[in-house]
Amino acid sequence: MSISDSRIVESPISSQHGPLTFTPTDAAQLSKSFAPEIEPDGGEEKKSLPRRSSRLPLMHPTWYSSSINNSSTDCLIGSGGSVTSSNNDSSRQEVPTVGVAEHDIPKLSVMFNRQKYYSRLVHPSDNRMRIPDHVLPASLFYIIPSNTTDKQSSIVTIFAIWNTMMGTSLLSMPWGLVQSGFTFGILLIVFMGLLTLYTAYRVLQSKDYLDFEAFEFSDVCKHYLGRWGEWVAVIFALVTFLGGMLVYWVLMTNFLYVTGVFIYEKASPNHTISNNTGPEVLCPTGYPIPENTSLLFEELLNNTVSNATSNSFYNWWSSTKTVPLFLAILVFPLLNFKSPTFFTKFNCLGTLSVFFVITFVITKAVNWGWNLEFYLSDDPNGYQLPEFRATFPALTGMLSLAFFLHNAVITIVKTNKNPENNVRDLSLGYLFVALTYLTVGVLFYGSFPLPKACIASNLLENLSTHDGFAVAARLFLLMQMLSVFPLLAYMYRVNALYAIFNSAWPGRTHVILVNLSIVIMCVLVAIFYPHIGEIIRYSGSLCGLVYIFCLPSVVYMMAKRSEEALSPIAILMHSTIIVLGVLNFIAQFIIKPSI
């Protein structure tokens, strides 16, 4: 067993002379004395030291522990088998030890602290002033086998890539196929998956061009583009988080509203809708429905409107007036925790919710059967809708966010046990994401029994409020989003505060103001513009323009130019990618898709 795969843990010593001060940093320094010395070729030590990034990454432990928790808890295992925990050296509990004579403790303490002082006079990489092996006897320490690097297998890496990209875009895929046309939409999903995979690969490879360790892509941007490049990367990472929070809030509002209506209907046996055996499928877009299916839907719609106006319940339980405010009262206290540790324990709910949605769509597709009939408003007799529609940029804007991984790809693959498989694992992750989107989009679109123009940007809106399976899906997703939203708000908050104040917790007032601004923006959007398809395509095209199309291409060309290896073909190819990103963003303001 090599010492590099082990962990040296202190056994605190206490006597009338006081405890022997020894920190985890000292343990790392002392461990060098046990390891065999390997000299470079020529017997000379390396002179170059790794450069450090001026802005540490979002969740990096070197500032996460100091800025968020303001202290770190060390688990101490004494020679006598006792376990203690402490927030600092001075408060460590006394643990009985064996193997050390009482009269040797003062001498060992003085000698060790002297060597500790000497070792700090030089750079930590300089071994000339390291603590000699004989200063402390081996009986004071246990060498506990452990994997300090916490490497993960390729399967875990692939699953992490898939889980990171799976989000609210999944519910909008059928709507995206409506905007682009069925066949052309499938081709667009494949094309955007390949394009975003390539630019994510460029982000992953960009760290190899540097002579220092890059914790995230913003460090690479700072190296090549200067301070403004880093700020652009950070700002648009914040825009990504904000767009995700807006979509989450609209969905949570909708799910909470429908859940409340379902409970109210079940608790009111005389309620009209509760006793109605109306259609399982709705058309919330207002598209004209053929005569053979319109009667029952219109009756249900009229009953809903009349009950909403005559019943006081709907006066204070409104999806666009009151429920967003009720949700704010529920969520705002959850945003003010210093650490998101509690909510990270519910990350598995995200994976379960995705599988639940897939199962839900497959079940509905089996029940409905395959229905690929198309209708136009000017020809309700069955004129087939073209496979290409001019509003296809709505889908490409959505896919820019659906395949967005570029601000996290370096962090995800950093701990891969086999880094030579990073490209393969990244490709497989994107493949599974594309297959998941295609499964939900194609099955729901192809089996939807009403005209395809009725498909809403949130596919659950096409299911009635008394559909038990749909209500269960909404309730499950609501619980999952209530646990994920504080994490998104936390990442947005610490990134913003750290960029401005160089601290993730500059003060409770700063944190409350940031959280309050988040909630206000989310409530306003849920009240005045509750269309998740539109929010996803606008935020996706904007963030995609910067993070997917521009920055990876610019960084790659600058890196190759510095190596004098930039070819005209590379310039043409990456310039085309940038132009596609610009056109994708501009097109969102030109088209008018159905919402």
Image: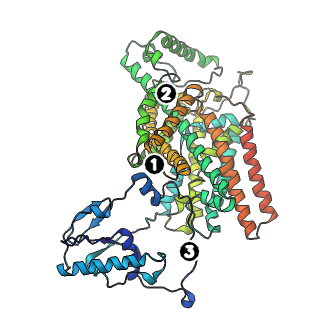
- What residue does disc 3 label? 49
The residue at 47%/9% (across/down) is 310
- Percent of width and height locating residue 94: 21, 66
- Taking 539 as reference, is 41 above or below it? below
Residue designated by label 2: 324
Please report whichever mark, 2 or 1, sits nearer to the chain's N-terminal start.
2
Is 278 or 342 nearer to us in this picture?
A: 342
Sort mark 2 into few (<14), some (14-19) or many (20+) by Cα contacts within 10 Å. many
Q: Is residue 358 above or below residue 133?
A: above
Question: Could you say which is closer to the camera, residue 403 or residue 65?
Answer: 65
* Residue 366 in view here: no
Q: What kind of residue is marked 3?
A: Leu
**Alpha-carbon neighbours of circle 3 within 10 Å: few (<14), some, or many (≥20)?**
few
Mark 2 or mark 1, which is nearer to you? 1
Q: Residue at x 77, y 49 (%)?
A: 579
What's the CA distance linking mark 2 and mark 1?
28 Å
Q: CA distance from mark 3 to mark 1?
A: 31 Å
* Image color mode: rainbow
The label shown at residue 552 is: none
Query: Which numbered disc, 2 or 3, marks the residue that appears first in the sequence?
Result: 3
- Which amino acid does the dot numbered 2 rest on? Pro
Residue displayed at 75% across by 34% down: 590
Q: Tell whether label 1 touches label 3 (CB within 8 Å).
A: no
Residue that carries the numbered disc 1 in the rendered image? 505
